[in-house]
Amino acid sequence: MTSFARALRGLWRRRRWLFGAYLLYALFAIPRRTHFQLVVPACNMRIAAETVGPSLRKTPHILLFGVFCALVLLQFDRVDRRSLAWSVVATTVLGAIIELEEGATRTGNCRLTDLLPDVIGAVSVAAISGAVVLALRARRGGKHRIS
């Protein structure tokens, strides 16, 4: 086994610790920018057509939260309905926490409609991952549904 393969195997075994460290860093990045000076967030919980449209065009949010959903999915030992659902839920919760942080630090807007691109990114990755798993199982002659 090459040293590169050994290094990859070591990273894979430590993936949950690495993910935890990444998550802690990500959760504290926004408050750290304001030196943890927080206020009570004033969140816009209204869902209206004029706020939904601009939120759905936030391609970077869709991509970044899709990547996060994929990272959450990698923490599970197998891809099934449970792991796909938990990945989408974890991504949505992270999006809500970030919205609250932006409101509490006054570095962004705290809007419910800003969760839409986060959920779209997560659901897209979950759907693609589920389809890939189904295709691989069908190719191997296994079950044709995600258990």
Image: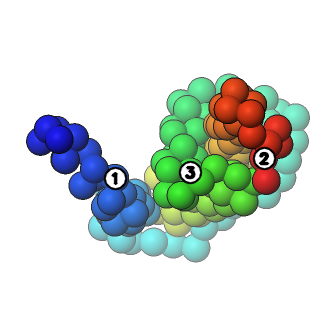
The answer to which image quadrant residue 1 occupies is top left
Instruction: Say above or below: 31 vs 53.
Output: below
Instruction: Say above or below: 44 vs 36.
Output: above
Q: Which residue is drawn at 58% across and 39% down?
A: 66
Callout 2 amino acid: Ile
Asked if the residue under mark 1 is in contact with the one under mark 2, i.e. CB atoms within 8 Å, the reply is: no
**Residue 73 appears left or right of 43:** left
Percent across and percent down for residue 86 are 67, 60
Q: Tell me how many marks there are.
A: 3
Q: Which residue is drawn at 51% across and 39% down?
A: 67
**Residue 8 appears left or right of 54:** left
Q: Which residue is drawn at 56% across and 51% down?
A: 73
Q: Which of 43 and 145 is in front in this view?
A: 145
Label ID, residue 146: 2
Instruction: Say above or below: 80 vs 129.
Output: below
Q: Residues within 10 Å of mark 1 (few under 14, many from 20)?
A: some
Q: Is residue 71 among what the camera can see?
A: yes
Q: Which of 21 and 145 is in front in this view?
A: 145
**Residue 124 appears left or right of 41:** right
The residue most toward the front is 141
Read off the residue under disc 1: 12
Read off the residue under disc 3: 73
Mark before the other along the chain sequence, 3 or 1: 1
Callout 3 amino acid: Leu
Mark before the other along the chain sequence, 3 or 2: 3
